Image (tube, coloured by chain):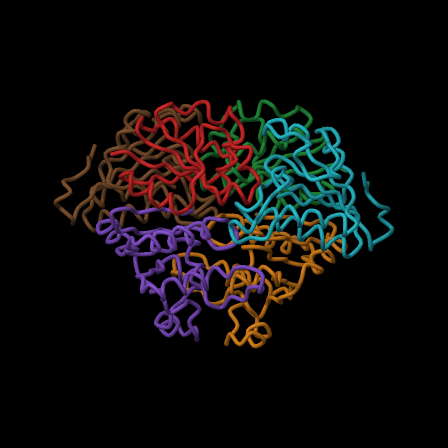
Chain colours: A green, B red, C purple, D orange, E cyan, F brown
Amino acid sequence: MSSLHTINRSPDSKLLERCLKVINADDAILFLEDGVYHCILPTNLSAIAETVKVYSLREDMLARATLSKTKDRVEAIDTARFVGLCCEHEKVVSWF
Amino acid sequence: MSSLHTINRSPDSKLLERCLKVINADDAILFLEDGVYHCILPTNLSAIAETVKVYSLREDMLARATLSKTKDRVEAIDTARFVGLCCEHEKVVSWF
Amino acid sequence: MKFSIVIYAAPYSTESAASALRFAESLIQQGHELYRLFFFGDGVHNASKLTVVAQDEINLQLQWSKLIEEHDIDSVICVSSALRRGVLDQTEADRHGLGAASAYESSEVAGLGQLVDASLHSDRVVNFG
Amino acid sequence: MKFSIVIYAAPYSTESAASALRFAESLIQQGHELYRLFFFGDGVHNASKLTVVAQDEINLQLQWSKLIEEHDIDSVICVSSALRRGVLDQTEADRHGLGAASAYESSEVAGLGQLVDASLHSDRVVNFG
Amino acid sequence: MVEKTNTTNPTKSCITFISRSAPYGSNRANLCLDMALACAVFEQDVNYVFLDDGIYQLLKGQDGAAIQNKTLGSALETLALYSIENVYVDQQSLKERGIDAAELLPSIKLIENDALSRLIKNADLVFNL
Amino acid sequence: MVEKTNTTNPTKSCITFISRSAPYGSNRANLCLDMALACAVFEQDVNYVFLDDGIYQLLKGQDGAAIQNKTLGSALETLALYSIENVYVDQQSLKERGIDAAELLPSIKLIENDALSRLIKNADLVFNL
């Protein structure tokens, strides 16, 4: 029963901290919209467990000019792959 | 040129911290809407300088059952007095 | 004193529009002048007249319109915000062939120049968002 | 797979509605089924048809309606959210004497039971707010 | 704690609601409650969790009338009427906000992160707002 | 830095805009910019400050088209065209977000809390969103 967690607000929202308190080891996180700003600062990502996969929406990174600044920990994906991730995980938990 | 600063989000928003970084010594703060939750925890208010008057909107505290929990540092006012405060200060800076 | 009020928030979704309404009513009651209401962004939804609200709940759009009419307040809905949100006066509805107006007649659709004018001619501008 | 999508946010004010639209388009393109769209809270504004959008900008409401019609998607506007926000289909407009509908005909005004049904009959429910 | 139901039964699922927003300031608390009540009416298994600012919804002595609102605290007392018995409040959220469990409406079970983790893991569906 | 103008001149005031929101995710950045441009058109003195998440608006290389949006970075380059020359970015906000001034659009002055304090104190009016 792994979950895909989506986060669409900037680090100021503290949504990632909240999500990490209740995330399970085989879950994954997808940053989209203003959530993609998490991916340009290592300190934002350092609290995410190794087992948790981290994705970020390429379209939103392109719009915001953060793609080239995005850390290696994060895999850039498009919306089609976002749909695929929803299929691979048994549910989607949206943090907004 | 003193300002009245209004804050209408809960402490989670960090609006008070932001406001305090740029507030002037003769300014005042008014908490309204979800901002009134700042007034029930002393640690939220401890960083406000002594010279800064602190107000909170009574209607919003009554709705939320926080009036009786509100700390002495805070003066409960009604909307009529809110209008009065706007007159006494030369401008209103809304943080939302 | 002369006040103007800028409202950025839609009714119901946050408390801001309701706070702004209470503030407007109070300042008028105290004998101050409300020079202008300016509805901006999602705030334009406060002028929608097609609303149906349960009897035991407050109809914010109707309350705004009553206040505006009763005190003959200059109330402006920002045109660029309003058109894309479907809040139209009769002029705009006719111009774009969209049938009836969806905005109360008590408010006028106009541009940001009205906000600049309000800034110049008011002693206080108060923002609710 | 069968998806349902719940949209809580008005168009333009945040990116969420636009993200939801891109997500919906993509899942259909990949051959998945979109069992239901459910517009809730401020999300109901996505079904407003009285909008006028500049030619160089995206008209989200129109895009939704085109997608819904083209793929014959079951699209629901939550009735309690919609009425107070002035988003009415012809039935509701007639019932309350408010003249013309303000919602696209491609969506239906209905209750939260449709959300529960979507939860039961979809493999995935994805929320955008 | 309700856990995932047998997937061979398509008429019943286990849905966890996480209500993270303060009452009155936004309508998110109401939207979350409305969804849960609808699920209960249609006999779904519901877990309801108050988290972060959502815990403020549980304070005793609320009076929505002070701001022309319905009192949300009373609405929450209806959870039991709708047979929603798995109602939880996050202990850490209370502590961070200086709220004692004695200040809350009765019949709410205290919960910690681990248990919330399981409520998410074991649900068919999570609504989180 | 523009300071408060003589109050005997009712056609000109000094307005400080504080833009605190990231681009694209919400329309707050656009609303703030639209207001400032309107004030500039009507020849008001404008200070424009990028604070907190607002600094993200200044990143070089934005491409709104990726999400069917106008590029906000380009819009900001128009500030100078409208004779808005007092454009500032908060140094601490940059540092907290790991952004170097070299990554930003040109012609923006770095500012610290004290100076922002004065821009608020000395303005006739502050718009802050």
In the rendered structure, the answer to whether residue F59 lies left or right of residue E66 reads left
Q: Depth check: B96 or E63 in front?
A: E63
Q: Residue at x 41, y 58 (%)?
A: C44
Quadrant of the rendered structure where residue B28 is?
Answer: top left
The quarter of the picture where the N terminus of chain A appears is top right
Most extreme residue toward the left is F8
In the rendered structure, the answer to whether residue F91 lies left or right of residue E17 reads left
The quarter of the picture where the C terminus of chain A appears is top right
Quadrant of the rendered structure where residue D55 is?
Answer: bottom left
Question: Residue D10: horizontal and vertical position, in percent?
Answer: 51, 54
Q: Residue at x 68, y 31 (%)?
A: E101
Question: Residue D88: horizontal and vertical position, in percent?
Answer: 55, 68
Q: Depth check: E123 or B42 in front?
A: B42
Question: Residue F67: horizontal and vertical position, in percent?
Answer: 48, 48
Q: Residue at x 16, y 49 (%)?
A: F11
Quadrant of the rendered structure where residue D118 is?
Answer: bottom right
Check the image and report above or below for E65 versus E102.
Answer: below
Check the image and report above or below for C102 versus C121.
Answer: below
In the rendered structure, the answer to whether residue E48 lies left or right of residue B48 reads right
Count of numbered badges drawn on the protein: 0
Q: Residue at x 52, y 35 (%)?
A: B37
Question: Residue E34: horizontal and vertical position, in percent?
Answer: 66, 53
Q: Depth check: F89 or E109 in front?
A: E109
